């Protein structure tokens, strides 16, 4: 991972208070995010999201909206990603969209793409 991507990742974690783990594995890439739920509770509750692609998937990304308790998934095409750094940058942008949808309560459904 490029040093600039690492800096962007650290800045993203601090600014948005979202835990993000990235993995550059041999045959595929994974970004896992733990997005805090907006509603106030006694304990801090997070919603997990996992984004997975392979090096040769032509921009297709498998999104697991709640990988810990559900088998539902979405498939999106994020366009050309030539490197792990490209994938991480696009994943961070998508995480913010997911956070906004979760805050508004519109991101819970799985639409027609769920398996």
Image (cartoon, rainbow, N blue to C red):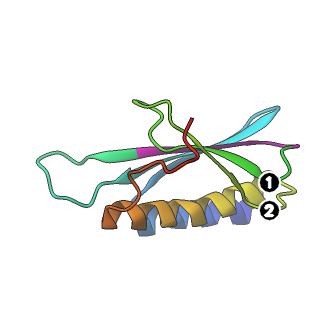
**For residue 22, which numbered disc appears in the image?**
none
Q: Position of residue 92 (x, y in %)?
A: 59, 61
Mark with earlier residue (1, 2): 1
Q: What is the quadrant of the C terminus in the image?
A: top right
Please indicate whether residue 65 sits to the left or right of residue 74 in the image. Answer: left
Image x and y of residue 46, in percent = 33, 47
- Could you say which disc has been placed on residue 59 in the image? 1
Residue 51 counted in the magenta span: yes
Would you place residue 26 above or below residue 7 in this image? above
- The outermost residue toward the front is 112
Q: Which residues are drawn in magenta?
A: 48-56
Q: Nearer the viewer, residue 97 or 7?
A: 97
Q: Tell me the residue that label 2 is attached to.
A: 79
Specify the farthest residue to the left: 42
- Does the magenta stretch mainly form a helix, a strand or a loop? strand
Q: Are marks 1 and 2 in contact (CB under 8 Å)?
A: yes
Of residues 36 and 14, which is closer to you in this image?
36
Residue at 77%, 60% (x, y): give it: 86
Can residue 45 be seen in this snapshot? Answer: yes
Q: Is residue 41 left or right of residue 94?
A: left
């Amino acid at each position: 991972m490029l040093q600039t991507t690492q800096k962007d990742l650290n800045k993203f974690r601090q600014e948005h208070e979202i835990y993000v783990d990235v993995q550059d594995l041999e045959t595929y890439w994974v970004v896992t995010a733990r997005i805090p739920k907006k509603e106030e509770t006694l304990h801090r509750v997070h919603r997990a999201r996992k984004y997975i692609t392979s090096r040769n998937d032509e921009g297709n990304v498998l999104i697991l909206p709640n990988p810990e308790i559900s088998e539902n998934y979405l498939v999106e095409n994020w366009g050309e990603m030539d490197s792990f750094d490209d994938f991480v940058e696009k994943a961070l942008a998508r995480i913010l969209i997911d956070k906004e949808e979760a805050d508004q309560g519109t991101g819970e459904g799985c639409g027609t793409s769920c398996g």
